Image (cartoon, rainbow, N blue to C red):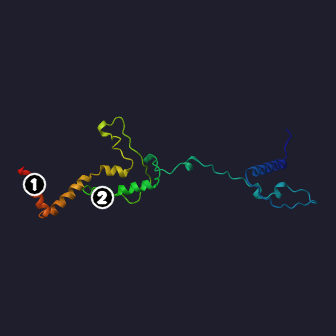
Amino acid sequence: MPDIVNGQVEELLREAEQRLRRDSAPPRPMPPVAVKDSAPAAEPSATISKEQLAVRKPQAQPTWKDTKKDTAGPNWFNLPKTDLTPEFKRDWQLLRMRGLLDPKHQKKALRSAPPEYSRVGQVIGGPADFYCARLTRKERKQTIFEEVMGAHDGDKLKGKYAGIQRNKTSGKKAFYQRLVLQRRKRQN
């Protein structure tokens, strides 16, 4: 292989650099270079600007850490960021107001803003659970609202309302009529 002169090495490197730029990036206009015919050719490094000879900086490749989703971290089992759908907002509002459905029992107040990291899912009973602990298909509900309303004891409120009405009507015409009706039942 013939020996390559320093001037030829620089020229080969410059040509390779130009080919790489032409293949990878959009073409840029070359700066004008003054050429003198009468003067002998100067060294190639003197006529080439520093911009053309600059070393290209490598582009950062997207890493695995950049592409992964925002989570609460490994200590929280990589719980994902909350997806604020209308259904989730409605369920969160219902959970916040659960104390209104059962005023006899104190519930811990939830903050008004939904949690930053959460996941909504369905609890599936395992085979180790007792048969009596599992819900039947009729008892299962589709939404949290239906579940809460199904567990809510409406009879308790109805009984309380009936007791208040009974006390209010005592001593009036309806009270007397009911008393007479009870006496007749005892005589028969």
Residue placed at 44% from the left, 45% from the top?
Answer: 77
- In the picture of the structure, the residue carrying the numbered disc 2 is 100
Residue 78 drawn at (x, y percent): 46, 47
Residue 86 quadrant: bottom left
Residue 55 drawn at (x, y percent): 72, 53
- Looking at the image, the residue that sits furthest to the left is 187
Q: Is residue 157 left or right of residue 4?
A: left
Residue placed at 32% from the left, 56% from the top?
Answer: 98
Residue 87 quadrant: bottom left
Q: Nearer the viewer, residue 87 or 112?
A: 87
Select label 1 or label 2 by which is in front: 1
- In the picture of the structure, the residue carrying the numbered disc 1 is 182
Judge whether residue 23 can be spotted in this image: yes
Which amino acid, by three-letter code, is at mark 1?
Gln
Q: Secondary structure at mark 2?
A: helix
Residue 133 drawn at (x, y percent): 30, 40
Q: Are marks 1 and 2 in contact (CB under 8 Å)?
A: no
Q: Is residue 158 left or right of residue 119?
A: left
- Circle 2 Cα neighbour tier, 10 Å, few/some/many (<14 / 14–19 / ≥20): few
C-alpha gap between disc 1 and disc 2: 38 Å
Mark 1 / mark 2, whichever is N-terminal: 2
Which amino acid, by three-letter code, is at mark 2?
Leu
Q: Is residue 102 left or right of residue 23?
A: left
Q: Is residue 74 left or right of residue 29?
A: left
- Circle 1 Cα neighbour tier, 10 Å, few/some/many (<14 / 14–19 / ≥20): few
As displayed, is residue 146 above or below residue 132? below
Image quadrant for the N terminus?
top right
Q: Secondary structure at mark 1?
A: helix
Residue placed at 73% from the left, 50% from the top?
Answer: 24
